[in-house]
Image: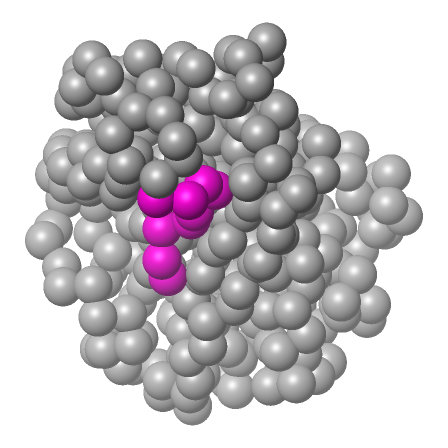
Amino acid sequence: MADDHGQHDEHGHGHGQGHAHTHTHIDFAEMLPMLEQEAELFTPLYAEAAGWLRGRQPEPEMIVDAGSGPGVISCLLADTFPKARVVAVDGAGPLLEAARARAARLGFADRFSTLEAELGDGLGDLEYPADLLWASRSLHHVGDQRATLAGFAERLAPGGALALLEGGLPSRYLPRDIGIGRPGLQSRLDAVEQEWFTRMRGELPGAVEETEDWAGLLSAVGLQHAATRTFLLDLPAPLSEEGRAFVATSLGHRRTGLEEGLEPDDLALLDRLLDADDKASVFQRSDVFVLAAMTVYVGVKA
């Protein structure tokens, strides 16, 4: 899993963006470059969220990033909370290797560690309870979300906080009418991806249907729902080269993964948008932007 699941997950991954595949199995280790690319571009949003959490939990001694992916956000949390020890937990060994390398590069190695564990099986052998547990777009990749949340709650210290990033709004990169093809491309991509997401959820081991009332679920597992806030990433046109590269990666990933559910004219439109030599592509057009909204729910253990 990866909290940078988002890295390509409109259900917030992602992980933002879409973990889109023609099948519903996701190899997050294979997605390492894309996960890093998105998390780095979205750093201003995550930094704002981390700053908000610092106001609620000023000096945590132990922070756990549940579904850490390649550790971009884990390291951001280490930077935001300079006295805390950070443990990145993920089920993909190659992503944890990347997280350790990032922490070493940034000078956090002495208070940064990793733990390979599947979130649905618990958080493994954590030595100490967490004062702050961050779970970013990782919970929806677990079959029984309520049971996993209950496991998270058990690993909190008294007064500890669980910050759950789920939901938000689908990201937008282009105007509704881009002058070529049928208007509304991104909305149609979203609709196909919603169907994929429902299949993905249903095929997870031990899948349990759950109303996506995240605040209610926090309360249901014994936590006090303390706050909810949505954070905005607004990168207006004209977009940087890094931003354009991300948009191309995101649309290309969705074009490949959602191909079976898309109409031929939309596939052709995506091909034009991804052709660097086409003046209508995201590499050359002047109206490309990134606008994303992600929601964080905080639950506190009594």
Q: Can residue 34 be seen in this view?
A: no
- Residue with the most extreme front position: 179
Left-right relation of 128 to 266: right
Q: Position of residue 282 (x, y in %)?
A: 54, 27
9 relative to 281, above or below? below
Q: Position of residue 166 (x, y in %)?
A: 37, 59
Residue at the spot 52% in from the left edge and 68% down from the top edge: 231
Left-right relation of 21 to 56: left
For the N terminus, the image quarter is: top left
Left-right relation of 47 to 167: right
117 relative to 57, above or below? above
Q: Where is residue 138 in the image (x, y as percent from the top left)?
A: 40, 48
Q: Is 171 one of the magenta-colored residues?
A: yes
Residue at the spot 42% in from the left edge and 44% down from the top edge: 175
Q: What stretch is highlighted in magenta?
A: 168-176
Residue at the spot 65% in from the left edge and 69% down from the top edge: 48
